[in-house]
Image: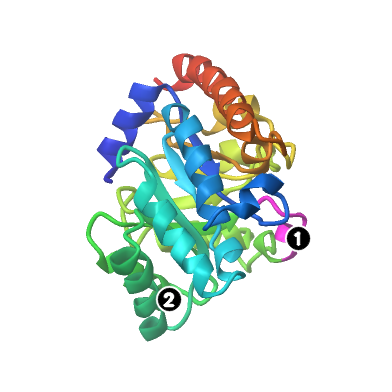
Amino acid sequence: MNKAQLFEQIKKKKSYLCIGLDTDLEKIPKHLLKSEDPVFEFNKQIIDATHEFCVAYKPNTAFYEALGASGWVSLKKTLDYIPKDCFTIADAKRGDIGNTSSLYARAFFRQMDFDAITVAPYMGEDSVKPFLEFEDKWVILLIHTSNSGSTDFQRIETRDGKFLFEEVIFASQRWATPDRMMYVVGATHPEKFEEIRKLAPDHFFLVPGIGAQGGDLEAVSKAGMNEQCGLLVNSSRAIIYASANENFADAARKEAKTVQLQMSKFLELWCK
């Protein structure tokens, strides 16, 4: 899915919601454990209930890798089930020397056929470029994340007075255009959004931290939107675990619709 197609879906659905499919066998409703593939069955019902309110799904691959071979099967079945009008993100946080990154890229873009993958940029250009060799696929660089330890390195000042995360933004804009690269910018640091938007005016931001982590959707939307929205705001636990009972899919639908209605208002206000 290219940038224009993504924006068309945002306008059509009046939403920039990304739902994180962080599916944990210890948290899904117990009755699903009797299913042949409990992880896929949970994801399937969540997708059926929420796809009209979101434009993207983001499976965190750790939840599937932890299950071994069966987890990869569940992940592939989930990816194949997601409607084609939804953007798909492998939240895999890869990044290694060039030849290894090439294999990661092949795994997630050719074997799995995700639209995008999250990549840690710490090892530099040659660790990111292999992911950009696949046409119409996206790299989402970890820039300013939502976790409590994000400031340990991301806000270290360099010799010319810039923060390290700013240096990554400047350098990475030489590697790809905004049509191929996004940035992860955590919702738990809304004070940085306006500043980061000035550094990357045309890029999409993948924004974790809304919902269970306490991020402010309104503040992020106001500071972060550009003319093509420029935001994919992720919510995982607050939606998929809205209920632990047999009505979990209905509860997830209700939560997703609530967020979509808020987003619709913010699009009218600030996506101009």
Q: Which residue is mark 2?
A: 127
Residue 237 falls left or right of residue 2:
right
Instruction: Give the residue type at disc 2.
Output: Ser
User: Is residue 23 something that shows in the picture?
Assistant: no
**Residue 258 sits above or below residue 220 on the image:** above
Residue at image x 35%, y 23%? 11
Magenta-drawn stretch contains 109: no
Q: Nearer the viewer, residue 106 or 185?
A: 106
Where is 170 relative to 158, above or below? Answer: above
Q: Which residues are magenta?
A: 146-152
Residue ranking furthest to the left: 135
- Looking at the picture, how far across and down is residue 250, in whole percent? 59, 27
Majority secondary structure of the magenta segment?
helix
Q: x%, y% of residue 73?
A: 45, 65
Q: Which quarter of the figure has residue 220?
A: top right
If the image is split into quadrants, where does the C terminus sit? Answer: top left
Nearer-N-terminus badge (1/2): 2
Look at mark 1 in the image and give the residue it sits on.
149
Residue 147 lies in magenta, yes or no?
yes
**Residue under the image location 72 percent in, 56 percent down:** 26
Type of the residue with mark 1:
Gly
Q: What's the residue at 42%, 27% (across, down)?
A: 52
Q: Residue furthest right?
A: 148
Q: How many marks?
A: 2
